[in-house]
Every structure is written in structure tokens, then in C-alpha cells.
Image (cartoon, rainbow, N blue to C red):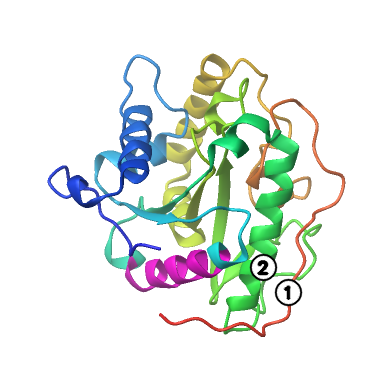
Amino acid sequence: MRGLYVDNPLSRDQLKDWEKSYLEKFSAKMSNKANPFPCIPAVIGFKQNQLIYSFIGDPRKSSTVADLAVALSGYMKVAKDIGNYTSLIVFYETPDDMKKRFSTEEYEKLFWKNLSELNAYDRFEWPEDIPSNPHDPLWEFCYSKEKYFMYCATPAHKHRKSRHFDGMMLAITPRWVLEEFNKHSKFAKGIRKQIRKRLITYDSAPIHHDLNSYGLEDNFEWRQYFLRDDDTSLSKCPYHRVLKNLKFDT
């Protein structure tokens, strides 16, 4: 695993070939003016260089989850000094055989496996104000006392281009970033409308019915972490807490 990376064209030569390729493809996606990426706050974060990157291993390996834990712990220490549009972008080194044969459902299982195992590295108890049941509207993923919104993109997403990337990828956004954004309710409401308009033209699949707002009674955050390529969704959240018996060096 490499350390956290702040993008700078002069430093890209230090990256491995696959890392450089993923970063360049991600940059092209986020800076495409002819076909703008739907998530406007993410585009703003990219333009202001507030996104932090991490490159980790094969998503099927348990050792990769340890790398993810180190990356998230390191990001947590610096996130509030970066800006109000920051997120951690995690690129998995996704082998060609996975890209060729894995379905969205297989990536979905892998995502939830990674997220469940990540909890084993958390040194802190779950925040008291967050329910332990994912089927509670106030539930969201937490790590090291911080609350996060998780987003997963994969090579298997073909119709939902907003969830497509050349390798398995995570975007991890602290809850406080979203709270800052929503402080200006009129502005936030307008941006959300623009996001939905962009989704209609960006994706060949209809807007997924699971997209909703945190805290509403008819919303479960976990459903938005991984959207399938069609309009189906899981009936039950696969996340479960793994015993905290693992250690890693920060």
C-alpha cells in the first residue's frame, strides 16, 4: 500500500503504471465539461484539489482491508484541514480477470465484505447517536468515531455510468462535509435538483429509487452505498460487525 496522495501533475511520475492510469481516468471523468459528472459537490472538490487519494491492493484479499483501514485512519487525521468538499478516493488494484468476469452483484458482495471486515480494525466503539441497526433511517457507516457516506463504483456498471469506473473504487465522504453542504438549504436543494437532471442524461438507466436523503423515514443510507446497474436492490443490509481482534500500524 502507498500513503495518501494529493494530486499534483509533477508527482504523478512517482506512481505505478496502474495508479497513474486510474488517476488520469478519474481526472478525465471529473473534468469532462461536455458530459459533466452528476455529483456537483464531488466535481467542486476535484476542482479545488480537496480530494485525497489512496491506492490499495486486490479487493479480494484480506490484507487489502488492512490497507483500507490505514488509509481511512490517515485521512481522518487530516480531513478537516483540507476543506468543506473533501473526500477520500480509494482505488483498488483490480486484476483483469475480475474486470472481465465479475458481475455487479459479485462486486456488491465484495464491497460489503470489505466494509464489514474494516470494522474489525476500528479501535473505537460505535458512536452512541448512531443506531446499530442498518434498517434504521439514522444508521450510517462509522469508523474511528467519524460518520461516513460510502460510494462504490465498479467496471461492471454499464448502464449506470455514474457508478462506473475502470477498477473497483470507493469515495468516502465524512458526514460533516454533507452537513456543511446542507447548512444552506436553498442552495443545497438547488444543487440536488441539478444532480438529478445530470443523472438523467449521464446514465442510460433510470434514477435508482434508493437515492434519497439522510434522516428521512423512508430512507436507508446503506442502500445508496452500492447501487446496482438495474433497478433492483437488496432486501436486507449485508453489513455485520466483525470482532475487533485485528491490529495494524498507522
Secondary structure found at label 2? helix
Write the start and end of the magenta stretch as one range: 65-78
Residue furthest left in the image: 10
Q: Quadrant of residue 17?
A: top left
Q: Is residue 215 visible?
A: no
- Closer to us: 221 or 24: 24
Q: Amino acid at mark 2?
A: Glu
Residue that numbered label 1 is attached to:
242
Using a 10 Å C-alpha cutoff, classify the residue at mark 1 as few (fewer than 14 neighbours), some (14 to 19) or many (20 or more): some
Q: Is residue 151 magenta?
A: no
Q: Looking at the picture, how far across and down is residue 38, in whole percent?
A: 47, 28
Q: Is residue 13 above or below residue 57?
A: above
Q: Quadrant of residue 133?
A: bottom right
* Badge 1 or badge 2: first in the primary sequence: 2
The reply to whether discs 1 and 2 touch (Cβ–Cβ < 8 Å) is yes
Residue that numbered label 2 is attached to:
117
